[in-house]
Amino acid sequence: MNYPMQKRGFTTTRTYPVAPELVFAAWTDPKQLGWFFNPGQPVDEPPEVDLRIGGAWRQRMIERPGKSYITGGIYREIDPPRRLVFNFGAIGGWPDLSTGLDNALLVTIVFNRVPEGTEMICTLEVPPHVSDAEAKAWFDIGIEMGWTQTVNRLQLSAAGT
């Protein structure tokens, strides 16, 4: 009997009425990364960004009082303002990248200039060599819903907010 392959990724697309440079900056400028935090939770540490291949962005996510963790990513590709690729997570954080990047989720964000402003295409992928059981575990904990909620927090308008 053939079983369907486990889901291995997803894509979320949004359009913003601003130039790609502004959407790219919202992902890479630590002064603008506040949208990534959980709303309504106190922020006691600002995001850190080392915008270079192999560099990291890190920020403390406070899920609820008493539960917080460092998250972020390790940059794999930076092509301003067209493309940003990073492994999701942080060394000693969540997801924990301490064991290396080979098994880490890969996030690819493409910023396309369109008549309306910028079309942002955000894709998250489980590496192809990771087992279906491990891929299923990511989706079972709600990685797609969580990333979709996070991306929905990014609000950019022609007024700059």
Image (cartoon, rainbow, N blue to C red):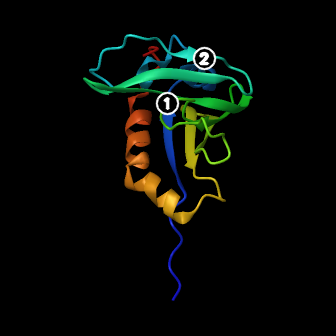
Badge 2: how crowded within 10 Å, few (<14), some, or many (20+)?
A: many
Sequence-first tag of 1 and 2: 2
Judging depth in this view, the residue of 61 and 27 nearest the camera is 61
Q: Residue 93 has which mark? A: 1
Q: Amino acid at mark 1?
A: Gly
Please provide percent x and percent y for residue 23.
56, 25
Q: Residue at left 61%, top 58%? A: 130
Q: Is residue 29 visible?
A: no
Q: Measure how far apart labels 1 and 2 are at the Cα level.
A: 15 Å
Q: Residue 161 has which mark? A: none
Judging depth in this view, the residue of 76 and 25 nearest the camera is 76
Q: Residue at left 51%, top 58%? A: 134
Q: Secondary structure at mark 2?
A: strand
Please provide percent x and percent y for residue 3.
50, 79
Above/below status of 52 relative to 120: above
Q: Quadrant of residue 87?
A: top right
Q: Amino acid at mark 2?
A: Val
Please provide percent x and percent y for residue 160.
46, 14
Q: How many marks?
A: 2
Q: Is residue 76 left or right of residue 130?
A: right
Badge 1: how crowded within 10 Å, few (<14), some, or many (20+)?
A: some
Q: Residue at left 72%, top 27%? A: 54
Q: Is residue 77 left or right of residue 117?
A: right
Q: Is residue 10 visible?
A: yes
Q: Residue 49 has which mark? A: 2
Q: Quadrant of residue 63?
A: top left
For marks 1 and 2, give the one nearer the viewer: 1
Please provide percent x and percent y for residue 148.
41, 42
Image quarter hosting the C terminus: top left
Q: Secondary structure at mark 1?
A: loop
